[in-house]
Amino acid sequence: MIMDTPPPTELVTIEIQGSGCHIILDREDKFNALNVQMITELCTLFEWTAERSVGIQGELADSNGVSFLRTLVLSGAGRHFCAGADINMMRDAGANSPEENRVDSERLDRLFNGLWSHPCFTIGAIQGVALGGGAGLVACLDHVIATSNVKIALSEGKLGILPAVIGPYVYRRLGSACFRRLAMQASRIDATEALRTGFIEAVVDTPDDLSPEVDVLIEEVLGTGPQAVTLAKELTLEFDRWTGSDEELREFTLDFTSRMRGSKEGQEGLSSFLDKRPANWKNE
């Protein structure tokens, strides 16, 4: 049985409208720094929204006509998106045993992997700073729109540690040389460099400009087959992990294409194109 209402949270806000979901980091007084409670709440919401997505359910709506989710927007309340790990959590890490720190790291991995692999199209609306774990969240999103005053940093090196847990996701977004440089440098990059290196996709002047830009992007995404969005992530992960031969990869892509063309969504997309009518996923 799929839950009809989101799990209760205190440090994170969730808003759902139609097939769209907006998750807001809501520790404004702490610059949305990540503590254990916020991380746990985010993990729970990422898992709940994933389960209620079109990509997982294979349908546009449930039996009551309530839309399953297709897009997820992540933002932070106040002046800053996320200042990284909460100071108390970092202090605790210094006193924890290796086993306790392993548990904390596993929680963080669940957070970042839950966002990276989320079946919805994920969008970041980012302002102010995104440091450490905040930069990790940015790296896990599909499309990031940031304000011109944004500052992003893999800041762990300033503390004598490294961005290891967020590393795979930042590495995939930026590539080897850029990830290595920013991890060693550990300093903040501005919107211009973030755009140049591929950390973000678009820049707007002010926080007030974020929502209109997000709305335009969502409208574009809703024209795409909703399960195709999820399968695009599956396809990318297969490419990332591929260890077989080139011939085996070509065979895999042939099978993948055949599966999509024969799917209900694939048949609807091809039929609507030939019939010169909107596909059923455009009739929300």
Image (spheres, rainbow, N blue to C red):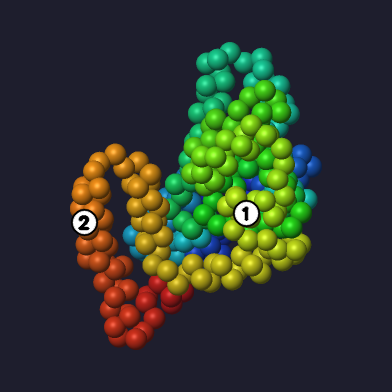
- Amino acid at pointer 1: Arg
Q: Which mark is residue 232?
A: none
In the rendered view, tell whether residue 98 sits above or below residue 224: above
State the residue in front, 17 or 263. 263
Q: Counting other residues with Cα less than 10 Å from the Cα at mark 1, is it few (<14), some (14-19), or many (20 or more)?
A: few
Q: Is residue 107 visible?
A: no
Q: Do tag 1 and tag 2 residues touch (Cβ < 8 Å)?
A: no
Q: Position of residue 62 (x, y in %)?
A: 39, 62
Q: Is residue 97 above or below residue 272?
A: above
Q: Amino acid at mark 2?
A: Asp
Asked if one can make out residue 158 in the rendered structure from this viewpoint, the answer is yes
Inter-mark Cα distance, 1 to 2: 36 Å
Mark 2 element type:
helix
Q: Please identify the residue farthest to the front as the structure is shown.
A: 177
Percent across and percent down for residue 112 are 52, 40
Residue occupying image coordinates x 34% and y 86%? 276
The answer to which of marks 1 and 2 sits earlier in the sequence is 1
Rendered image quadrant of residue 217:
bottom right
Instruction: State the image quarter where residue 162 is shown.
Output: top right
Q: Residue tagged by mark 2?
A: 255
In front of the other: 45 or 187: 187
**Circle 1: element type:** helix
Residue at 63%, 38% (x, y): give it: 182
Residue indicated by mark 1: 196
Residue 254 position, x and y percent, is: 22, 58
Mark 2: few/some/many CA within 10 Å (<14, 14-19, 20+): few
